[in-house]
Image (cartoon, rainbow, N blue to C red):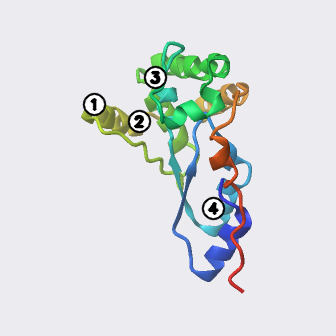
Amino acid sequence: MLNLNTLRRAHAELPVSAVQNEYSMLWRGPEDELLALCDELGIGFVPFSPLGYGFLTGAIDMGTSFAPGDFRAGTSRMDPENRQANMALVELLQLWAVRKNAAPGQIALAWLLAQGPSVVPIPGTTQMPHLMENIGATEIDFTSVELAELNRAVAAIEIQGTRAPQMVAEWSDVEAPSRI
């Protein structure tokens, strides 16, 4: 995750318009402090991997195997034992998808959009049907009661495993050296 001191220093030097960082129901780390800092400084927040590298769409299940070199194979949250536990999140999305007449991925994206006006997720895809499905997330609204209910349900699921391979994790939250 982005180092908060580095962001403050960079913004003081030259105003930052937006920050891009991983954020999804599968990894909610930016909620700890980064989103609040972005709001404080008037910085937009652009979540990458808002669909948890495809996991939150329901396309990955216990029968899924990853090709050699696939990033997801290097994250322990995709190990079979952790994936089994993390499927609770997919099941929650599937329930809400039925409730809202949507796809699970649309619920995950709509949830991100509901986190505040400065949060603008960028789901990546190379397939037109997925693009059209992702765009459909903008049509899903949650009442304040529904959003509170969904947030409680998401928070109750303890994600198992690490979000990134060790090499990537070592570079997370590293403060950039001062120029002076």
Query: 10 Å neighbourhood of mark 4: few (<14), some, or many (≥20)?
Result: many
Residue type (three-letter) at the residue carrying disc 4: Cys
Residue at the spot 59% in from the left edge and 26% down from the top edge? 78
- What whole-number distance in Å separates the C-alpha atoms at marks 4 and 2? 23 Å
Q: Which residue is mark 2?
A: 137
Label 1 residue SS: helix
Residue type (three-letter) at the residue carrying disc 1: Pro
Residue type (three-letter) at the residue carrying disc 2: Ala
Which of the marked residues, 3 or 4, is nearer the chain's N terminus? 4
Q: Which residue is mark 1?
A: 129
Q: Which residue is mark 4?
A: 38
Which of the marked residues, 4 or 2, is nearer the chain's N terminus? 4
Q: Is residue 16 above or below residue 111?
A: below
- What whole-number distance in Å separates the C-alpha atoms at marks 3 and 1? 19 Å
Residue at the spot 68% in from the left edge and 45% down from the top edge? 29
Kindly check if marks 2 and 1 are in contact, taking CB atoms under 8 A apart as contact: no
Q: Position of residue 179 (x, y in %)?
A: 68, 83
Location of residue 34 (image quadrant): bottom right
Which of the marked residues, 2 or 1, is nearer the chain's N terminus? 1
Label 4 residue SS: helix
Q: Which residue is mark 3?
A: 100
Query: 10 Å neighbourhood of mark 3: few (<14), some, or many (≥20)?
Result: some
